[in-house]
Amino acid sequence: MPRDGRAGTPSVDPQQLWLSSDQPRRGRKPAYSREAITAAAVALADAEGLEAVTMRAVAARVGAGVMSLYSYAPDKETLLNLMADHVSGELPTTTHVLTGDWRADLKAIAHLQRGLMLRHPWLPAALATRRIPGPNTLAFLEHALAALRPTGLDGAAKLEIFAQLTAFVAGHVAHEAAQAAVSQSPDRAAAEARYLAAVAADGHHPELAEALSAPGRPLTPEATFARFLDRLVGGLDAG
């Protein structure tokens, strides 16, 4: 029976999800499309967060009865897969030209992923559980694998690198969101700074004291992401 279960609970048949028709298999001629329902779910998540996305809330957005939506997405897990692939369509695959410098290309791909996740802040959480790649996701994966061709690595290693990169970007964007929330509370940020200063001065944490006394680096989100990304990509083995 269809339900609004937690992500990961119901099983999703990849062939049925991605290779079947966009139209429901039973009933009258549909008044909606899977694309329209998915877009409504994405808009809801963008505006109110992933927790706000329920089949009932999405149905209200498109003006449909909740039961009619189950013909398109029988559960929330399916809907999340549709949403993740829908927004992946924003990632360029034909207009983003690869340079042949795999490290530079990999960094560019990471920046594209970060931009996508910043536009859709719910996406890192949605990707935290295993997602079944749809056509848009597969197109971007194909692009990333082409970027890694000059490495000479085997296919399994290239897939691992792409997974590692995506996990890094998702984790970093989630961290950025948490840091942004702290910055919106000056009192909290100041309290945390005073606490760390006190800990560094207590004589029991000399390594931390030395680290905190080091010259500062640019702390803009973009500069911080670029530094972390440089370390990650710089440490990848191409041999």
Image (spheres, rainbow, N blue to C red):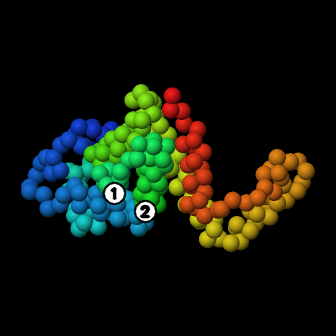
Say which residue label 2 marks.
119
Question: Could you tell me if residue 36 is visible in this image?
Answer: yes
In the image, is residue 156 above or below residue 31?
above
Query: Badge 1, how many Cα within 10 Å: few under 14, some, many 20+?
Result: some
User: What amino acid type should be assigned to the residue bearing mark 2?
Assistant: Arg
Residue 45: mark in rendering: none
* Residue 98 percent across, percent down from the top left: 38, 47
Give the residue at x 71% y 71%: 187
Left or right placement of residue 199 versus residue 168 in this view:
right
Give the residue at x 38% y 38%: 145
Left or right placement of residue 105 versus residue 54 in this view:
right
**Residue farthest to the front?**
100
Q: Describe the element under mark 2 as helix, strand or loop.
A: helix
In this orientation, which residue lies closer to the viewer: 156 or 12?
156
**Residue farthest to the right?**
203
In this orientation, which residue lies closer to the viewer: 165 or 11?
165
Left or right placement of residue 206 versus residue 125 in this view:
right
In the image, is residue 74 above or below residue 115?
above
User: What amino acid type should be assigned to the residue bearing mark 1?
Assistant: Glu
Say which residue label 1 marks.
90
Q: Total of numbered circles in the picture?
A: 2
* Residue 237 percent across, percent down from the top left: 54, 33
